[in-house]
Image (cartoon, rainbow, N blue to C red):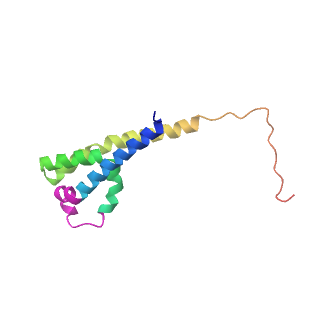
Amino acid sequence: MTSTAAVLVQGAEYWLTAGAVVAVLFLAIGIDRIDLDARGAYAFRPLLIPAILLIWPLVLLRWLRLERDRVGWAARYKPPRASHLPVALILGTALAFAVISGLTIRQSWPADIVPEHLGEVGT
């Protein structure tokens, strides 16, 4: 019988292994095919590895979509940009809710405890 922690670690290992395969393929083959500005720019590619390891399904989906469609520059970036406003509104609302709830939820001080006055340092 395996523990929950062992199952989670094994799942994370599989996820990162798949992410490593996608990162190698995407950074070696795919990025040059879908982004003209990335051609010949090899110094920044290692910086993408941690993100690709974590969000490899999204990288694969976007890569396949851009390979299949072969659309112009403006149409390539329209879907991600279309979601910026709703996400900004949701995050702004969540932040305002967190701040307001943090200011309104206060702990009550016990009424029977008398505060002590601290003396000078060293006395």
Q: Closest to the observer: 25 or 105?
A: 25
Residue at figure coordinates x 33%, y 49% from the top left: 17
Image spot of residue 67 (x, y percent): 15, 50
Q: Quadrant of residue 104?
A: top right
User: Which stretch appears magenta?
Assistant: 28-44
Q: Please provide percent x and percent y for residue 96.
A: 47, 40
Tell which of 76 and 39 is nearer to you.
Answer: 39
Residue at image coords 27%, 52% = 21
Magenta segment includes 3 = no
User: Relative to residue 31, is residue 84 depicted above or below?
Assistant: above
Q: Position of residue 116 (x, y in %)?
A: 81, 44
User: Measured from the top left, where is residue 78 in percent x and y?
Assistant: 21, 47
Q: Is residue 54 left or right of residue 82?
A: right
Q: Quadrant of residue 34?
A: bottom left
Q: Nearer the viewer, residue 86 or 40?
A: 40
Query: Is residue 63 positioned above or below 102 on the image?
Result: below
Q: Is residue 37 left or right of residue 112?
A: left
Tell which residue pokes out farthest to the front in this image: 1
Task: Identify which residue is drawn at 84% across, 53% down.
Answer: 119
Quadrant of the drawing holding the C terminus: bottom right
Image: 67 above or below 110: below
* 38 inside magenta stretch: yes
Q: How many marks?
A: 0
122 sits to left or right of 108: right
Please name the residue shown 22% across and 50% down the image: 77
